[in-house]
Amino acid sequence: MKKFLVLFLAIFMIVSLISCKKIVQDSNSNTEEGSNEHTTSESSNSTSSETPENSGDIPVNGLKFKLNEDKKSYCVTGYYTFAQNPSTDQHKVIIPETHSNLPVISIDNEAFAYTPLEEIVIPSSIVHIGERAFRECRQLKSVVIPSSITSWGMEAFWGAGLETVTLSQGLTTISEGAFSNCKNLKSITIPDSVEIIGDSAFANCFLPTELIIPDSVKKIGDNAFASCSNLKSITVSNNLTELGSNAFGEVLIFGKPAAAPYYNEYDNGYYLGNENNPYLIFAKVKDTSRDSCQINPNTKFIHSEAFRSSAISSIVIPNGVISLGSAAFFLCENLENVSIPNSITHLGSYAFDSVEWQLNCYEDENGYYIGNEENNYIVFLRGKNKADGSSYTVHPDAKFIYTKAFEYYGDPQTITLYNQIIFIDSAAFYSCDNLNNIVYNGTKVEWEKIRKNNSWKEDASNFTITCSDGVISN
């Protein structure tokens, strides 16, 4: 009996000791957690104790940072909510130039997206703003972009509540969708360092009534100013070399002169331009009931849907025009003759949509073309009917392969293209189930330089491209 009591007491003491040890451990753990929270609070006022080894998010005055891969700089990743960190000010953010004695050089993707941010101060140490960084910050009324930032990620301020934007000298690119859907935007000046205005950069914005695109701008992207219905005056860069699809639509396509008195006029057309060339862009037909339209000889661009629903029967696009916009002749039911100049370097998708079957074309044994008296074969519009499995050779002078050019035309096994080709439109080889080889008489580098619509290979078989210096697998 005594032995049993001794054994019981021994077991009881061991269990008690283990329980006491666990209580002590739990107490220490809680103490450590309290210490960490205190350290975070202290770090709100001082960052000297933090080192680059802390590569995760670090809260300072509510802001979160992460160490960049180079271990020499930091990126702002956002901020904690007030509940997470009482030092957070969700309405006003001042980004420091340094953190832990290292520069803060970037704002991360979606760092402040969908937050109640009202004011942001971006220091000159920042060189990059990430994609959607301030997306739908609807309380944010103004922003100053420092000159240290030369470009930023797409949709950086999409849908923000911005009323004024200050872009500093040195900015070279306004990115895709940068200020799209900023419907309160009333003041913005594009600095004369900007060279590229990206796709949909200002689409659906309530821009100021006057817009000046400086001569530094060389490219305006697709839909860049689409649906900016408040515009009343537009001055376009005289050094423009590329005008994207629907760049100013639907303002141009559906706008009326009484509501938008910024047009210049010549014959039966409305134009956009500048002091040096008022006729830079043929915007649209003035009187759609007339069957003719003479384009000004100084014109360089034909805007998307410029001739939409007009009664024109014949059109000569003058030499000097470099770009014919997408769906330029959409619903032109009377159109029979189009002359395309040798100067054309850009053909918008579906430029001849709805009229391709009614046009008088030049032709050879393989297909039908649109061109001019000097060069009949600029645009390969469509192939001729051939037996299945036949081969096609596009004329050596052709520069463009039109959309669905080979649909319904013999399902060729081989198509030969020459190195004058500069653009292949969408679904060019649509339904070519037997196509196994495109023979290209240029090099692989030249083939890669050809501009191609994103869907140029749509619904085509897996084919190879045989170039003069080797084969490219599709």
Image (cartoon, grey):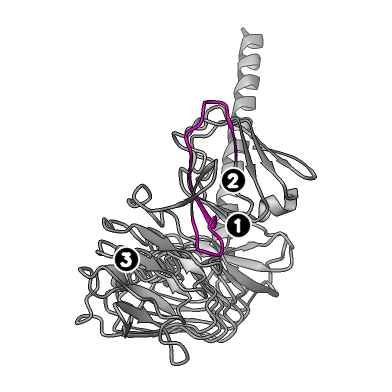
Q: Give how far apart the Cα atoms at labels 1 and 3 are.
A: 24 Å
Q: Using the image, tell me which numbered label, if any, was put on residue 422.
A: 1
Magenta segment's dominant SS is loop
Q: Which residue is mark 3?
A: 307
The vertical placement of 406 against 92, above or below, is above
Q: Which residue is mark 2?
A: 394
* Relative depth, front residue between 454 and 409: 409
Q: Is residue 114 left or right of residue 276?
A: left
Q: Percent x, y for residue 90? A: 40, 70
Residue visible at 45% across and 80% down in the picture: 297
Q: Give how far apart the Cα atoms at labels 1 and 2 are.
A: 13 Å
The vertical placement of 261 against 16, above or below, is below
Asked if residue 130 can be seen in this view, the reply is no
Which amino acid is tagged 1? Ile
Q: Is residue 465 left or right of residue 306?
A: right
The vertical placement of 344 against 384, above or below, is below
Determine crowd level at label 3: few under 14, some 14-19, many 20+ residues with C-alpha closer than 10 A.
many
Determine crowd level at label 1: few under 14, some 14-19, many 20+ residues with C-alpha closer than 10 A.
some
* Relative depth, front residue between 382 and 305: 382
* Relative depth, front residue between 121 and 315: 315
Which amino acid is tagged 2? Val
Q: Percent x, y for residue 324? A: 45, 65
Q: Using the image, tell me which numbered label, if any, was put on residue 242.
A: none
The region drawn magenta spans 370-392
Which of pointers 2 and 3 lies earlier in the amino acid sequence?
Answer: 3
Q: Is residue 204 left or right of residue 2?
A: left
Query: The residue tagged with tag 1: helix, strand or loop?
Result: loop
Which of pointers 1 and 2 lies earlier in the amino acid sequence?
Answer: 2
Residue visible at 61% across and 7% down in the picture: 1
Query: The residue tagged with tag 3: helix, strand or loop?
Result: loop
